[in-house]
Image: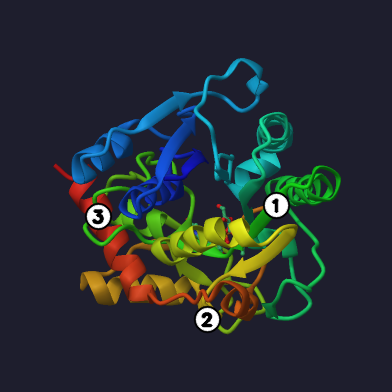
């Protein structure tokens, strides 16, 4: 039975990983500072699975010298600040949290001879790409401090792989959305700035402000930003494969995770209207600082190497997300 350290394990993506690890017979060890999460997902996973989860409250900005953890076989590193717009306003906080936090974690891995790390990076490292569809060879050009902080960590991991023999899988996520089908776990914070949660939060009246569409003058088919949305459960499937892959494959490996299909902001709003059978109110405002125009990815490297392909569609992302917010925040 493998022990997997999951940083950010109480958060939106981390908690989906923890649930799947338990379902697959691994033992997750959750490390979280609860700055953007609560214990709700942990309690729910314990209730659904009957597992008793090990949870360590720790802020990665503090070196891990005195931390008490069981023997770890692999680290899955989700814990980070992740709002593009906020990172433009608070760059030092983002670099300190994301870069310093990761260096502390990698130092711990080196000291404890934990050889395998799976790291959450982002499509945002490509910035405004020269082509609509990117792949792992597309040059990086991060626009926001958030994106740059992730690229710096990728580099630290690559150098550490060469110097210390660390085995690394870096996943560059495109736009992660959706929840487990029963809507039982998810983002427990209502401050999420991502598009699909923002549509739902405003529509349900949980967020008191109207939905903003950030710019309709981008060079795209309808002027709004185009992204490649990927279901969180497909993303988690890739992480489970990566844990096994690293057992057999040394070195540094990088993969883009997306579906290859692009949807504009207005197309996402339309799809939500179709699913909810209700009109969405929104207003078009200025572009959000740090945002790019459009991006989708070719994920054939992940298919070839990990046997991974996204299986779920946009409807499943919106429906499960809607279910999460309706069943947890509407009383
Ligand atoms: C980016 C990254 C993603 C990363 C995420 C972290 C890219 C392609 N993707 O997502 O890998 O994990 O940050 O947060 O860089 N929008 C609105 N109104 C809203 C919210 C968003 O119009 O209230 C628009 C944005 O301007 C953008 C699109 O919706 O065009 C998607 O935005 P969002 O969901 O926040 O994700 P990204 O910033 O693209």
Query: In this rendering, would 208 be left or right of 81?
Result: left
Q: Which residue is mark 1?
A: 167
Q: What residue is at 69 percent from the left and 43 percent from the top?
A: 88
- Of residues 66 and 152, the one drawn nearer to the viewer in this rendering: 66
Compute the Cα span from label 1 to label 2: 30 Å
Label 1 SS:
strand
Query: In this rendering, would 212 be left or right of 188?
Result: right
Residue 30 versus residue 20 in the image, above or below: above
Which numbered disc flags the more N-terminal residue, 1 or 2?
1
Label 3 SS:
loop
Q: Residues within 10 Å of mark 1 (few under 14, many from 20)?
A: many
Query: In this rendering, would 157 be left or right of 233?
Result: right
Q: Which residue is mark 2?
A: 261
Q: What residue is at 65 percent from the left and 25 percent from the top?
A: 61
Residue 140: image location, x then y, percent: 80, 64
Q: Is residue 18 visible?
A: yes
């Amino acid at each position: 039975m493998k022990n997997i350290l999951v940083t950010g394990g109480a958060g939106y993506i981390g908690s989906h990983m923890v649930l799947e690890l338990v379902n697959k017979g691994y033992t997750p060890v959750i490390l979280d500072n609860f700055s953007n999460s609560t214990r709700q997902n942990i309690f729910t996973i314990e209730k659904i699975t009957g597992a008793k989860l090990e949870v360590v409250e720790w802020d990665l900005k503090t070196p891990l010298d005195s931390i008490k953890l069981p023997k770890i076989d692999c680290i899955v590193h989700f814990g980070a600040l992740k709002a593009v717009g906020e990172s433009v306003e608070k760059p030092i906080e983002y670099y300190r949290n994301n870069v310093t936090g990761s260096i502390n974690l990698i130092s711990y891995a080196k000291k404890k001879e934990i050889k395998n790390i799976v790291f959450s990076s982002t499509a945002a490292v490509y910035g405004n790409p020269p082509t609509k569809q990117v792949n792992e060879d597309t040059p990086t050009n991060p626009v926001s401090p958030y994106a740059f902080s992730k690229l710096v960590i990728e580099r630290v991991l690559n150098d550490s792989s060469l110097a210390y023999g660390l085995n690394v899988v870096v996943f560059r996520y495109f736009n992660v959305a959706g929840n487990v089908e029963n809507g039982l776990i998810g983002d427990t914070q209502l401050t999420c700035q991502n598009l699909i949660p923002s549509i739902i939060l405003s529509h349900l009246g949980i967020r008191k402000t109207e939905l903003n569409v950030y710019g309709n003058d981008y060079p795209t088919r309808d002027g709004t930003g185009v992204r490649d949305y990927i279901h969180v459960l497909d993303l988690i499937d890739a992480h489970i494969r990566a844990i096994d892959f690293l057992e057999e494959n040394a070195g540094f490996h990088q993969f883009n995770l997306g579906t290859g299909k692009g949807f504009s902001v207005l197309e996402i709003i339309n799809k939500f209207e179709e699913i909810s059978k209700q009109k969405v109110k929104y207003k078009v405002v200025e572009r959000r600082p740090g945002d790019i125009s459009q991006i989708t990815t070719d994920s054939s490297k992940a298919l070839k190497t990990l046997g991974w392909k996204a299986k779920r569609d946009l409807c499943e992302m919106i429906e499960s997300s809607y279910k999460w917010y309706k069943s947890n925040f509407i009383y």
